[in-house]
Amino acid sequence: MLTVVLQQGINGIVVGSLYVLVALGLTLIYGVLVQINFAHADIVTVGAFVAYFVTHWLSGNYFAGIAAALAVGAVFGWLMNAAIFAPLRDRGNELLPLIATIGVSIMLQNAMLVLLGPIPYAFNTPYSNEVIRLGGTFLTVQNALIIIVSTITIVLLYAFMKFTFLGKALRAVSQDRETAGLMGINPNYVIMLTFVIASALAGMGGAMLGPVLVLTPFAGTSVIVKAFAIVIIGGFGNVEGTIIAGLIVGLIESYTTQFLDPGWIDIVVFALLLLTLAVRPTGLVAERREENV
Amino acid sequence: MSIVTSRRFWLVVAAIVIGLLPAIFTDSYWRTNLIVCAINVLLAIGLDFVLGYAGQLNLGQSAFYGIGAYASTLLITQVGVPFWVAFVAGVLLAGVAGVFLSVFAVRLRGHYLAIASLGFAVITYQVLLNWISLTQGPLGIYGIAPPPPFAIPGLPPIEFSNLASLFYLTAGFAFLVYLLLDQLVRSPVGETLTAIREDEVSAASLGVNGQKWKVFAFAVSSAVAGAGGCFYASFVGTLVPDAFFITESFSILAMVIVGGMGTLIGPVLGAILLTVLPELLRGIGDLRLIVYGVSVTLVVLFMPGGLVQAARLVAARVRRPAKVGRDP
């Protein structure tokens, strides 16, 4: 029994750390722009497919696949900002960009469906079948890689936000765009940079989710609804909250699968979301505005 | 006011068009599409009431649509209730679900509401999928009967087993709902909702109870979606949860946006266009949803008022030379 609990705990952390990567991008964008990018999940799917094809072409070089997904994600982020968010920024209607990105999301999903078909792709990396045993529990090297890469990425992102000039500029813009502009920070550049970073994270998240998920053009949809839930449970724009909520949702997912039924995952996660909204709309981690990225 | 610009004139024209459509389209393929159009019109004007007038982005319409469909069908097949009783119950239940969601909605704004309502749609879909003892889950419910014949004393009963009369039923109902919503948005109620959409704090300072009116808008909107669900079930004859996945919410949203939110005629046009256009473009695989996606994005970027705004621009272009006097 204890091994089952431990094993599912490990699985939950693996999935949770991937959700954190995806949700962090959403939270970063919300922080600087107070906008939601609905197509974020489809960048995750694009990243997964890019990694799949690159890994296969290069006969199993998974790290090249991750790097390619990161780069393609960054390009998509730049495009999303240039085509959708920058032109709509001065319209003053907070719902229009959200609706436009829903359109982009429908478009991307169905374009991938036409190109790649609905049959799931089997994305096996050279690390999918190597197993590390720890007592009664086990962990594939792929999953260990997921935890390590996510942790390094999150730490790097945190250091970037805390200690570099650009990171400080990003936080300044998210606190007060106009004042940051008066201090000589170009908010348009910072916003563009945020989209590039957030989408690169999404692409990379996709590269690592690909081998774990059922890889179809709609893979992103199942991830995005959870990423939204995570971002709200953690408090929109709150990085620490997002990390904690992402791990909680990952654990909920694995324990629900073990002890209830996989069909209950979304119900439990969204019940937690609605409960959070009803009781603490600012998120689980108390809102400290100066710490909000 | 000339006769061409009067509202009553256009309503009569619309009623005549609805009456003539099944006579023009006699094959069952297009009659089926006409019914789909009528149901989509119903769903679109329902969403527009809460989105375009009250300014609340509700992504949960697929849930209310599904609740109406499943509730009415289960009442008919499991309890044996007559169709119209089940219809009223389905509509009421969807409305009550809307009130439940609005309990969260009144406290949330903009993005939070969009995601909370999306969450509601996800939960409803999962419940439909996993409560197998009630909904038969992914296997679905089959052989749902069409509405029973409608008997008016002294006239032969109207059978709803043929597509033309089923179209008259759904389109007639959609027309009635349109009239009702049209009266509502032109009354002080419409002005109150618009005031809440534009500036809730200012509206509150003038004594408007924003929360109460938002609950009202949600209830109306979700009840209309529930009615659409009841008609959908009796028309298609089969219910599977996948018909009420969250993408259905996005499709309804696309109709409202492409037509022009904040007007009632816009969503009607948007629903008809986005139902008919993909049928005309058939044979290119999964083009339907790509068309939805592209049109939503382009409309938001370049013509946020949708088809209605485009029509107004064209009308202004046409009218201008007449004022100069070039037209006889």
Image (tube, rainbow, N blue to C red):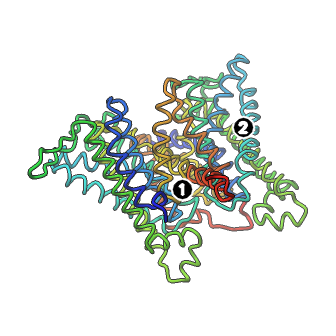
Q: At which x and y percent is residue A147?
A: 66, 39
Q: Amino acid at mark 1?
A: Met
Q: Amino acid at mark 2?
A: Gly
| Label number found at residue A73 | 2
Kindly tell me whether residue A157 is visible in this rendering: yes
Element type where label 1 sits in the image: loop
Q: Residue at x 38, y 36 (%)?
A: B33
**Residue B231 or residue B317, whichever sits in front:** B317
**Residue B237 or residue A73, whichever sits in front:** B237
Q: Are the residues tagged 1 and 2 within 8 Å (C-beta)? A: no
Figure check: A266 above or below A116:
below
Residue indicated by mark 1? B261
Crowd class of label 1 (few under 14; some 14 to 19; many from 20; radius 10 Å)? many
The disc numbered 2 marks a residue on which chain?
A
Q: Quadrant of residue A209?
A: top right
Residue B113 lies left or right of residue A65; in this view the side is left
Kindly tell me whether residue A243 is visible in this rendering: no
Q: Residue at x 53, y 69 (%)?
A: B194
The disc numbered 1 marks a residue on which chain?
B
Looking at the image, the residue that sits furthest to the front is B328
